[in-house]
Image (cartoon, rainbow, N blue to C red):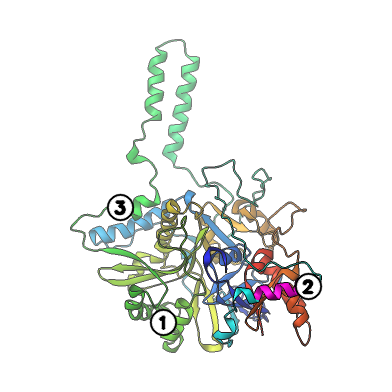
Amino acid sequence: MAAGGSSPSIVEYFGGEDGYRCGYCKNETGNLSHGMWAHSMTVQDYQDLIDRGWRRSGKYIYKPIMNQTCCPQYTIRCQALCFQTSKSHKKVLKKMLKFISKGDVSKVASEEEPMDSHTEDVVACDFAYKSESHVSQSELTPLRVDHTEGVENEDKDTGETKEEVNVQKVELGSLPTCADKDTPVPGEPSRSAKIVHAPPKPGKGADLSKPPCRKAKDIRKERKLQKLLQNQMCTFEGSPLEAGNEVFLLQNSKSKTNQPKTIEDFVFVSLPDDAPHKLEVRLVPVSFEDPQFKSSFNQSATLFAKYQMAIHKDTPSDCGENEFTRFLCDSPLEAENAPNGPECGYGSFHQQYWLDGKIIAVGVIDILPYCVSSVYLYYDPDYSFLSLGVYSALRYERSARTVRSSFLLSPRHPDERHLLYREIAFTRQLHEKAPDLCFYYMGFYIHSCPKMRYKGQYRPSDLLCPETYVWTPIEQCLPLLEHSKYCRFNQDVKAVDEGRVKELGRVRVLHKRTVMPYSVYKKRRKGPSDEASVQQYASLVGQTCSERMLLFRS
C-alpha cells in the first residue's frame, strides 16, 4: 500500500516521443518530451513528479526534454503567502466587484498585462501520445502482499540484498513561509548568490529583475521624514519634542484604511443586500459519484464546448462530451484525506463560478500536499468583459482534440483576466488548515516566447532548475535566460540531482499482477533487455518515486 493507505501509483512509460509541432516558434518537429500513462496516482507521487518538471494532461503525464526541445518549458510556482498585488491587478479585481455590487459593465481603463497585447490563439505544443492504455483492469490489480513478499524472499534466496517493496511513509516537513526570510527552502540555492540584472531587449516586456515602481507620494513622504529627522538632530532652536511629534505623526499618518489591501480584501468582500448579482464559488470533486459534479456535468460540458468553439475555434466534434470527459474529468489522482490536510481533501477538483444561478467559468485544479496546481480554465465568452482568466489563474490552457488523439497546449486568452486571484486566495485559505500547502503552481514559464513571459509578473515566483531540481527565485533566472534559452539555474557547479537513481534494482515493477523489484523482474523477463528504458524512466521520476510507483511491464 502507498503512503496514507491509498493504492500505489501505476504507470506505463512510453519513453521519448518523436518531435511534434511547436506552437510557440512554429517548428514542425522541434517539440520533444517524455511521456507516461498514469492508470492511478497518489497525490504525493504527483507532487514529487511536478517538482521534477512533469505535468499532466488528463491521465497522460509528460516532461519536456529541456536541453533538446525548441522552446524549453520551466516549471513555475508562485509563493502564494507573499503574493504581491500590482496596480493593474487591483483594477481587475475592482472591475469584478463593481459588476457584482453595482451591475457596472463599463470597461475600466487599466494598465494591461503583457499577456493582453495579443489576441490570437497560440498553440504551445502538438504532441501525439498513445491515446489510452489497452491494458485490462485485471492486469493492473496487484496480488496480495504475501505473494509479493514471496517474490522478495525469492530474491533474497539468490544471495542478493532484499528489496523493499513496502512503501515507507513520507514525512511532509513544514515548508518555511515567506516571513521566514532567513530560513531557506530545502534544496534552494543561497540567497546571497550574486545577481546580475540584464535589461530586457526592446519589445520583450517589463524588466522583471528590477523592483516594482513606487508611488510618488510614498517617496515624498519618505524624503520629508528623513528631512525632519535630520532637522531634529541638527537644530538647536525650537522644541525637539515638537519636531519629534511631527515625525511621529508623519510616520502614522497613513491610516489603516490606506494600508495596501490584500487579495482577500477584494475577493472576500461583503456585498450589499441589494447587489444586482450574486457570485458563488463551488469546489466540486472530479468524480461521477459526487452528486454536485454529476448534476452539473451537462451544464459544465456545454460551457466547455461553447468556450472551445468561440475562443479556440474548435469544431463541435473536437469538444463533445467524450472529449470533455477524457480531458478534464478523467484524472489519475486518487482522492485522499489526511489529518493535517485541507478539509476538502487532496485530489482533482472543478472550481465552479456560478453567477446568478448559472455556471460562467470553471477552473480545473489539483490540490496536492504542497500546492494548488492549475490545470485548465474555461468560461462563458459572453462574460469576457469581466476578465475571468486573471480572476481565476494565469496558467497554461489545454484544448482537447480528437484528431490524432493529441492534446494542444495554449496560453491564456487575453479576456481570461480575473480568476487568478481566486485560486491564489484559495491557496492561502487552504494553508490555514494545511500548513505545508503554500504554493500556487502556474504550469510552465517559456522565456523564449515573449508572449508567455507574463507568468513572471506574479511575484514572488520561482523557477525549477532542469538539472538539479531545486527552486530558484525568478529574478536570478532571467539574466541567464537572456543569454540562453536553456539554462541550469543552480550556479553551484558541484550540485547534482539529489533525487537521482542510485539503485536501479530497487525500482518497483508490476508484472503479471505481482509486485517485485526490478532486480527480480530482470531475471524473469524473456526477450530483449529493457534495462535502458527502465533506467531512463527511473532517472526522470527519481529514486523516491521509482520505489513507490509501480512500473507496469507486460
Residue at x 36%, y 56% (from the top left corner): 93
Kind of residue at disc 2: Asp
Task: Work out whether residue 131 can be spotted.
Answer: no
Whether the magenta-drawn stretch holds residue 153 is answered as yes
What's the distance in space between the residues labelled 3 and 2, CA to CA?
67 Å
**Which mark lies nearer to you, 3 or 1?**
3
Residue at x 59%, y 40% (from the top left corner): 182
Residue at x 38%, y 58% (from the top left corner): 92
Q: Which residue is mark 3?
A: 269
| Label disc, if present, on residue 157 of the rendered structure | 2
What's the distance in space between the residues labelled 3 and 1, CA to CA?
34 Å
Q: Quadrant of the N terminus?
A: bottom right
Sequence-wise, the earlier of marks 3 and 2 is 2
Kind of residue at disc 1: Met
Q: Quadrant of the C terminus?
A: bottom right
Sequence-wise, the earlier of marks 3 and 1 is 3
Which segment is the magenta one?
148-158
Choose top left, top right, bottom left or bottom right for residue 509: bottom right
Mark 1 secondary-structure assignment: helix
**Which mark lies nearer to you, 2 or 1?**
2
Number of numbered discs: 3
Closer to us: 154 or 542: 154
| Left or right for 237, reference 457 | left
Residue at x 65%, y 52% (from the top left corner): 187
Q: Which residue is mark 1?
A: 309
Chief SS of the magenta region:
helix
**Which mark lies nearer to you, 3 or 2?**
2
Whether the magenta-drawn stretch holds residue 265 is answered as no
The image shows residue 465 at horizontal and vertical percentages of 66, 59
| Label disc, if present, on residue 165 of the rendered structure | none
The image shows residue 553 at horizontal and vertical percentages of 67, 82
